[in-house]
Image (cartoon, rainbow, N blue to C red):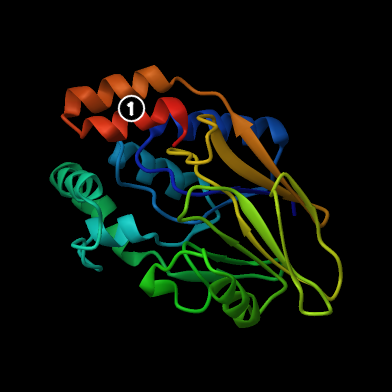
Amino acid sequence: MKTGIISDIHSNFEALTAVLSALEREKVERIVCLGDLVGYGPDPNACVETVLNSAAFSVAGNHDHGVAGLTPIEPFNLHARTAVEWTRTQIEPRWMSALSSLPLVAVDDAFMAVHATPNFPAKWHYLFSEDEIADNLEAMTVPVCFVGHSHAPVAFELNSEHDILMRPADEIRFQPGRKYLINVGSVGQPRDGDPRAAYGVLSDGVFTLKREVYDIAAVQARMRQAGLPAPLIERLSTGQ
């Protein structure tokens, strides 16, 4: 089944709608979301409603749980906490309830979906060290796992010799007997130096990373109007 994979929308409705239009052109048969529907951006209600109406399933991210009061926000940086607190004042009760109900992990015949890590999904760890990457590849119950969280696309492959290979996530062709841990980047707040919205397409055993231009200035104007922190507004232009 041709699948569109999105993550880290972060209340950026312009980026989300641009990506959904691109996925429609791609003729995907379903969409999967890896969490963080909210946080940072100005349109939490529209993003939650649109994702839940568009995606076959979605898992929860740390910002979703932070807004819903299911995870402490004290570890968040100042600007992220400010955005979470603002979002709590804006989000409708029905969408708050929906965020609270999202699962941490989803597994089907093709892959595992989780926001942060497959081994401890509720701890919101980042996959930065070689030990963390190795532990999570070993913890995977299926050969392929898609994650978000860091907003930077990258792929890790565990081969039959138990060597870990790191590579760009641009195009990954799955091979039997190997495991793949793939970060699909961020729709609403990319951090790999490319400000275009990132998303992925999985088809016939091949994952392809895609980018889509959207109206960044329109989002920034709405963020300024909402009084959201300036660094969150400015970083959209640089993809940092």
Question: Vertically, is 41 above or below 71?
Answer: above
Q: Which residue lies furthest to the left in this view?
A: 89
Question: Vertically, is 80 above or below 124?
Answer: above
- Residue situated in front as seen by the camera: 130 or 233: 130
Name the residue beneath numbered marker 1.
234
Q: How many labels does the image show?
A: 1
**Camera sees residue 204:** yes
- Residue situated in front as seen by the camera: 50 or 74: 74
**Among the 4 quarters of the image, the one containing residue 140:** bottom right
Q: At which x and y percent is residue 217?
A: 38, 18
Q: At which x and y percent is residue 127?
A: 52, 65
Question: Vertically, is 47 above or below 34?
Answer: above
- In this rendering, position of residue 158 left or right of residue 145: right
Rendered residue at 38%/35% (across/down) = 12
Q: At which x and y percent is residue 56?
A: 55, 55
- Residue situated in front as seen by the camera: 106 or 135: 135
- In this rendering, position of residue 116 left or right of residue 42: right
Rendered residue at 37%/43% (across/down) = 10
- Residue situated in front as seen by the camera: 34 or 51: 34
Crowdedness near tag 1: few (<14), some (14–19) or many (≥20) residues, C-alpha within 10 Å? some
Question: Vertically, is 79 above or below 24?
Answer: below
Q: Which amino acid does label 1 sit on?
A: Glu
Label 1 SS:
helix
**Camera sees residue 42:** no
Q: At which x and y percent is residue 210?
A: 66, 37
In the picture, the quarter occupied by the C terminus is top left
In the picture, the quarter occupied by the N terminus is bottom right
Q: Residue furthest right?
A: 176
Rendered residue at 59%/48% (across/down) = 153
